[in-house]
Amino acid sequence: MEHKVTLISKECFGAGHYPCNFSSSRGGRVIVPVYCWDGNYMLYSENNGADFERRDMTEKLRGTAFRELSDGTFLGIGESNAVHRAIYDLDGKIPFALAVYRAESFDDIAAGNVTTSICLVDIPHLAAGYGDSGNRHTGDAISWRELSNGDIYVMMYGQFKDDTTLCPYFREYGKYDFYLYRTWAIVSHDRGKTFEYVTTVADCQTYPIPDVNAEGYCEAEAIEVEPGHLVAVIRTGGHEVYSPLYCVHSYDYGAAWGTPYEINPWGVLPRLIKMKSGTLVCASGHIHTMLFFSDDDGATWSKPYIVDECDGKWDKSSSGYTSIFECEPGVISLVYDDPKEGIAEGRESGKVRQVYHVKLKID
């Protein structure tokens, strides 16, 4: 389980944060959007993240994550409910409108030449909840994969009307009722033309978390490690609360999920890859930027390997939102942000993070 990690190279691309919504092709082309107070930009690679160059980000690109499907076209999924602001009766039946983006080539993605369609998805018991910044929302589609059976499987989170676990922190400091998130899944059997609700993956009523001042099951990513066997890692923490990353398995293409179990006491937005050696790697962060390894398809996980140490409050920490690739057999490419240099330079709060790319040899 223990792996030797050797730093090959490290490069800084300047100010910015949240370098996580990457687009990729099977031919090795990668775009990583970077959000920056001085103007957004992107990191571009033609060798699966072995090397990046900084480029201006086309306004049309918007940071949507595209993946190449098995038919050679590219698909992107909108994160938020496209009709949220149009809903008057937030206590009634809430429609979810999923934005589906398509491009014929990677060049079209880079240029923003993308078509849009809207799929109405019936999500039972969907509720209007609050995000951690006091914003109302009606669910988020956070990650997706094309499975070996051709399905497009999407992980979502938000609140259902069945969610009754309140977060005292937001009631006291935000003056609103924040019910802890649940994670659920939707699926398309026709390459993204239509979607349907599948099942809840984890919720706080069924699987309570250690601290109700955290946020609940959110920001999940799933990967198919064998045909039909999906492994998901899910965030629960928030607002400086240590609450675990959990792992959970499905053995029927995501139709049902088992019991979640803790793999680390903290972490946000996990990113998963399976290396050519068979090792499963999870990247996460916020308190440190870190990697976890599993050699048994997610049944057990290593202790965290700290890529970049940083244990600060939110505006003095990394965002924890990363992009990860295996750029060649046994070599991981990781893009992340870190605030230490910005803090040392005395930059103002909220503008301290810089974006880094490291290559790491995994033995």
Image (cartoon, helix red, strand yellow):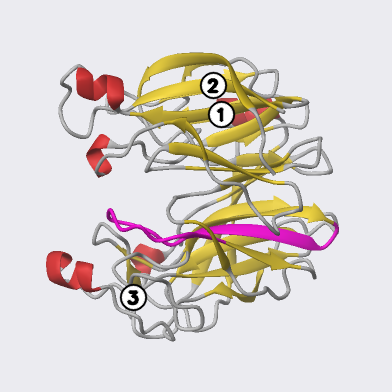
**Left or right placement of residue 7 versus residue 158 in this view:** right
**Image quarter (top left, top right, bottom left or bottom right) of the N terminus:** top right
**Left or right placement of residue 239 versus residue 97 in this view:** left
Viewer-nearest of discs 3 and 1: 1
Q: Which residues are magenta?
A: 227-246
Q: Secondary structure at mark 3?
A: loop
Viewer-nearest of discs 3 and 2: 2
Relative image position of residue 246 (x, y in whole percent): 54, 62
Mark 2 and mark 1 in contact? Answer it, CB < 8 Å.
Answer: yes
Relative image position of residue 19 (x, y in whole percent): 46, 33
Position above or below: 241 against 161: above
Badge 3 amino acid = Tyr
Badge 1 amino acid = Leu
Relative image position of residue 242 (x, y in whole percent): 35, 57
Whether residue 63 is visible here, answered yes or no, is no
Mark 3 and mark 2 in contact? Answer it, CB < 8 Å.
Answer: no
**Left or right placement of residue 23 versus residue 327 in this view:** left
Badge 2 amino acid = Val
Image quarter of residue 137: bottom left
For the residue carrying disc 2, how many other residues have a C-alpha within 10 Å: few (<14), some (14-19), or many (20+)? many
Residue at numbered disc 1? 334
Q: Which numbered dot is residue 358?
A: 2
